[in-house]
Image (cartoon, grey):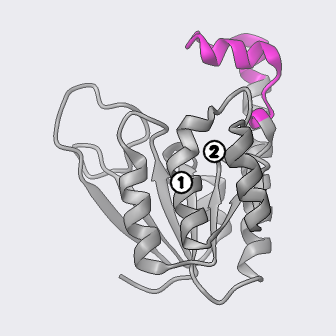
């Protein structure tokens, strides 16, 4: 495995246990910063900020504290700064939030709005990742939904040297949606330069 400045870990957002792999990689590289989509716009760069969120136990309307609790506690205990790289509630208006929560299909006007929001979110991810690349000589771990790491995504086009660690589908590609049938999901690693 090459020692690139960026290590993306593809998250499934719950259809497999993402944290186990994240913990393994974070322990291996001992980064100064872990950047996380699910932390949205929250920056935990001091002991006080960690302690406040551990008391408050609130992330947003789109992410429950339980979804990131293990990551927060782990980074706190390892003295790693945990940085959100997204927009609060992922930038979704209340109508889109409700449809996503109810797992309803998003169509028409909402679909066009969703496409704009996704592009804005990815541009925000890129801006923050670039900012933090200037702040450390250690590798940066970036926890990002697998969909954002798909072939030819804006994220992948914006950086030259990085690794992607991802669960794989049966054909060996990045797993970007729940598998249609049960199989033993394995992780793979892609070097991009």
Front position in the image: 42 or 113: 42
As for residue 43 lying within the magenta part, the answer is no
In terms of secondary structure, where does tag 2 sit?
loop
Front position in the image: 108 or 11: 11
- At x 77%, y 68%, the residue is 46
- At x 74%, y 39%, the residue is 56
From this view, report whether residue 149 is shown above or below residue 158: above
- CA distance for labels 1 and 2: 10 Å
- At x 71%, y 43%, the residue is 55
Asked where in the image residue 47 lies, by quadrant, the reply is bottom right
Q: Is residue 61 visible?
A: yes
The image position of residue 16, as x and y in percent, is 35, 39
Q: Is residue 149 visible?
A: no
Crowding near pointer 2: few (<14 within 10 Å), some, many (20+)? many
The image position of residue 18, as x and y in percent, is 41, 48
Q: Are marks 1 and 2 in contact (CB under 8 Å)?
A: yes
In terms of secondary structure, where does tag 1 sit?
helix
Asked where in the image residue 103 lies, by quadrant, the reply is top right
Q: Which residues are magenta?
A: 89-112
Q: Quadrant of the N terminus?
A: bottom left
Q: Closer to the camera: disc 1 or disc 2? A: 1
- Residue located beneath label 1 in the image: 71
Q: Which of the two labelled residues, at mark 1 and mark 2, occupies the earlier sequence position?
A: 2
> Is 140 placed left or right of 53 in the picture?
left
The image position of residue 116, as x and y in percent, is 79, 34
Crowding near pointer 1: few (<14 within 10 Å), some, many (20+)? some
- At x 52%, y 63%, the residue is 8
């Amino acid at each position: 495995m090459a020692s690139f400045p960026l290590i993306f870990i593809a998250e499934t957002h719950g259809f497999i246990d993402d944290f186990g792999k994240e913990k393994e990689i974070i322990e291996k590289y001992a980064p100064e910063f872990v950047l996380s989509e699910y932390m949205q716009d929250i920056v935990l760069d001091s002991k006080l900020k960690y302690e406040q969120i551990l008391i408050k136990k609130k992330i947003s309307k789109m992410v429950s504290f339980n979804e990131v609790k293990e990551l927060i506690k782990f980074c706190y205990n390892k003295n790693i700064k945990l940085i959100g790289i997204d927009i609060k509630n992922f930038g979704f208006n209340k109508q889109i939030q409700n449809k996503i929560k109810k797992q309803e299909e998003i169509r028409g006007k909402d679909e066009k709005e969703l496409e704009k929001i996704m592009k804005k979110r990815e541009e925000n991810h890129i801006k923050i990742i670039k900012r933090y690349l200037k702040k450390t000589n250690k590798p940066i771990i970036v926890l990002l939904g697998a969909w954002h790491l798909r072939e030819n995504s804006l994220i992948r086009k914006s950086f030259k040297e990085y690794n992607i660690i991802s669960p794989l589908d049966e054909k060996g590609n990045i797993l970007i949606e729940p598998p249609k049938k049960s199989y033993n999901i394995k992780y793979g690693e892609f070097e991009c330069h």
